[in-house]
Image (cartoon, rainbow, N blue to C red):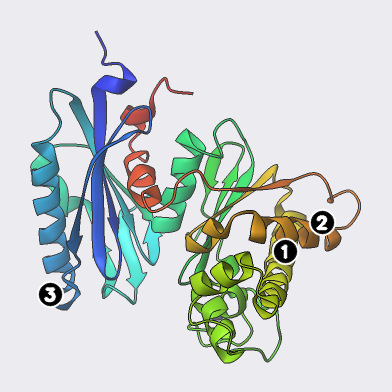
Amino acid sequence: MAPTPEQRCAVGIDVGGTNIFAGLVDGTGRLLTTLKRPTPVAEGPAGIFGAMRAIVRDLSGRVEGRQLVGIGLGMPGLIDRRRGLSVFSPNTGFENVPIFPEFAEFGLPVDVDNDVRAHANGELKFGAGKGVANFILITLGTGIGSGIVLDGQLYYGPGSTAGEIGHITLEPGGALCGCGKRGCFEAIASGRNIGRRAAEAGIAGTSRDLFQKAAAGDEAALALVDKVAYDLGRGISIYAHLMNPQRVIVGGGVAQAGDLLFGPMRRYAEMESMPGVRGTYEIVPAVFGDEAGIVGAAALIPALTEGVA
Ligand SMILES: [Zn+2]
């Protein structure tokens, strides 16, 4: 008999510039066990792959009778999923590195995607995108990333760069972005840059502090949160006009600000949407937080989610 969703599991590995988070995820999207190791960035791709293999071996010993059906990887930067290639990742030093051969010894299906798309995939299979054919996931963390789901499938584009919304110019001549341009959405409204704006205004040191102060009623903090919500709402409305999604799912650290942010963000996104677009999409928080990358990476393995819909 085929294993039930509860009886199968996959390894999900979320490789970040500082830490590797990993875990076992069952066929219902439940996280069974997790671990965290530092990313040995100084050792280059060989060292990072070595650390990832050690993690797979460790997790393989924790399946407790379940069937291990594959290894899913979420990696930063530009990933060519079809060819299993890390095309470019400035934080980890990968450049045109083939990924699948590194995991051949396990004899299991291996899949890889960019970390944000992996998160979108997790929301699609188990979270706020379940049963939603067309949605966009926007993550507000250090940067701004997004994953696009069209007709129930992740959308890549020929160069796998679809969804780079963080680098749409929102403010010509604005703050310098890590990509070298000025006034990018990310340079204005990512978690790191919300923190920068709060610091420049003398209100708070980080975006988290800003939202805490705003929640406590600090007027200057509330005024800046309102500006940030406007920028985010504007960015979301651009995306909504382009893609006609049913949902815009907002994840990443900033999304934890909750209604304080979502309330005005929804209002401004509506205000910036033309009739016919306005009211056709809802803006909701992501289901997955810190574990999003692990769950989403594991969900890349088709055998994990088969028959779960
Ligand atoms: Zn940029």
Residue that lies at the very extreme toward the top in this rendered image: 1
What's the CA distance linking mark 2 and mark 3?
Answer: 48 Å
Q: Residues within 10 Å of mark 2 (few under 14, many from 20)?
A: many
Q: Residues within 10 Å of mark 1 (few under 14, many from 20)?
A: many
| Residue receiving disc 2 | 270
Q: Name the residue under label 1.
A: 233
Q: Is mark 2 on a helix, strand or loop?
A: helix
Spatial distance from mark 3 to mark 1, Cα to Cα?
Answer: 41 Å
Q: Where is residue 67 in the image (x, y as percent from the top left)?
A: 19, 25
Quadrant of the image where one finds ligand 1: bottom right
Q: Where is residue 305 in the image (x, y as percent from the top left)?
A: 38, 28
Q: Is mark 2 within 8 Å of ligand 1?
A: no
Which amino acid, by three-letter code, is at mark 2? Glu
Q: Can residue 252 be seen in this view?
A: yes
Whether tag 3 and tag 1 are in contact, CB under 8 A, the answer is: no
Q: Do the residues labelled 1 and 2 touch (CB within 8 Å)?
A: yes
User: Label 1 to label 2, Cα distance in Å?
Assistant: 8 Å
Q: Name the residue under label 3.
A: 43
Query: Which label's residue is closer to the chain start, 1 or 2?
Result: 1
Secondary element under disc 1, as helix, strand or loop, is helix
The residue carrying pointer 3 sits among few (fewer than 14), some (14 to 19) or many (20 or more) residues within 10 Å by Cα, namely: few
Residue at figure coordinates x 48%, y 77% from the top left: 206
